Amino acid sequence: MTTPTPVSGPHTHASGGIATDMTWVALALAPATAFGVYLFGWPALNLLLVTVTSALAFEALCLKLARRPLRPALSDGSALVTGLLLALTLPPWAPWWIGMLGAGFALVVGKHVFGGLGQNLFNPAMLARVALLISFPLEMTTWVMPQPLSGAGGPGFLEGLAITFAGVPTPDALTGATVLGQAQTGLSQDLGLSQSLDGVYDPLHQALGWVPASLGEGSALLLLAGGGLLLARRIIGWEIPLALLGTLALLATAFMLVDPERHAGPGLHLISGGVLLAAFFIATDPVTSPATRAGRLLFGAGCGLLVFVIRTWGGYPEGIAFAILLMNAMTPLIDHYLRPRAFGRNRRGQPLEPAAPETAPDGAGRRP
């Protein structure tokens, strides 16, 4: 009897990959991105194009310097998604050089200094945002009221080019503080939240995005829909979004019950700032988050805790970028202590003792 020759190795092949996952992430972000461009007009579209194009250019430059082929890395979509995520965290009328510098920092320092895709310790987009916020606080905290593309008061195409590339200053009548910034300013002046946010915070407008915000904070509903798509496609897991949003909501509820005039409720925390964008699209980055389910739950809870602490007692009204970077630094430690048990070994990595064979009633040994 002849033994059949195997035609292939005993491997399971999945249809997904880096390019597929990045495509789905970009598609999930597309509705919120398009709505943000509609809300803030031509300057927002200009900044988006500059940031994404710069990210691709810096990716190509790093690959060229490293003498690596351009096509595989440029076509996997990782640089495009990094540029897109960074653009969504920027003020929509920021000057062009903010997007270019941020993209360069994200790709060069945040990614290729560590060795390229899969080797970076920190999320590149968040690393670039924090670097820009610390280096250029004025440009990174100048917010504008929504100026829709279809509106008569918004800048036209040529005016948008002048705002983005010629440094035309934003009129004071169009600028405004974010809800989180307004709340922090009021509390610093010993004003209660009800007085600080009177006429400023409207939950419906906040959820729909009709407020001063970054390009990607526009619509909480569209971000939730995009996150739901990634969950349905199993591009991301449920652990980090649930732990992050749940921890933030629980802390906000507890402190609101203690002093509602100094601590905002969970609704304001969840639909304001970049929490939803980060919970589904940034904190879930598989490279910079833990590998195990328990680790991801701890990671998400840590992000939610840090966001609440920074927003409540820190010097910045928004703390999501700092929270993610701090938890990125904790990821290797989390993976070290919360790694899965290897088959045949205990939690300490020691081999398990073989089980003694059971004895049949007639005295013959039999295998369990």
Image (tube, helix red, strand yellow):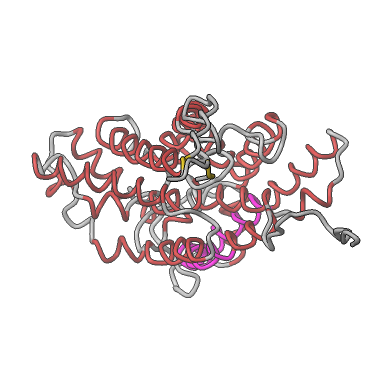
The residue shown at (46%, 40%) is 359
List the single residue furthest toward the right: 2
Is 163 on the left-hand or right-hand side of 138? Answer: right
Q: Quadrant of residue 60?
A: top right
Prevailing secondary structure of the magenta residues: helix
Q: Residue 309 placed where, x, y %?
A: 28, 33
For the residue pair 65 and 199, the one nearer the viewer reads as 65
Q: Is residue 30 on the magenta stretch?
A: yes
The residue shown at (54%, 44%) is 367
Is 114 placed above or below 308 here? above
Q: Residue 137 placed where, x, y %?
A: 46, 34
For the residue pair 242 and 279, the one nearer the viewer reads as 242
List the single residue furthest toward the front: 362
Is 347 placed above or below 90 here? above
Q: Residue 323 placed where, x, y %?
A: 41, 35
Q: Is residue 192 on the magenta stretch?
A: no
Range shown magenta: 27-52
For the residue pair 226 and 243, the one nearer the viewer reads as 243
Q: Which quadrant, please, contains the N terminus?
A: bottom right
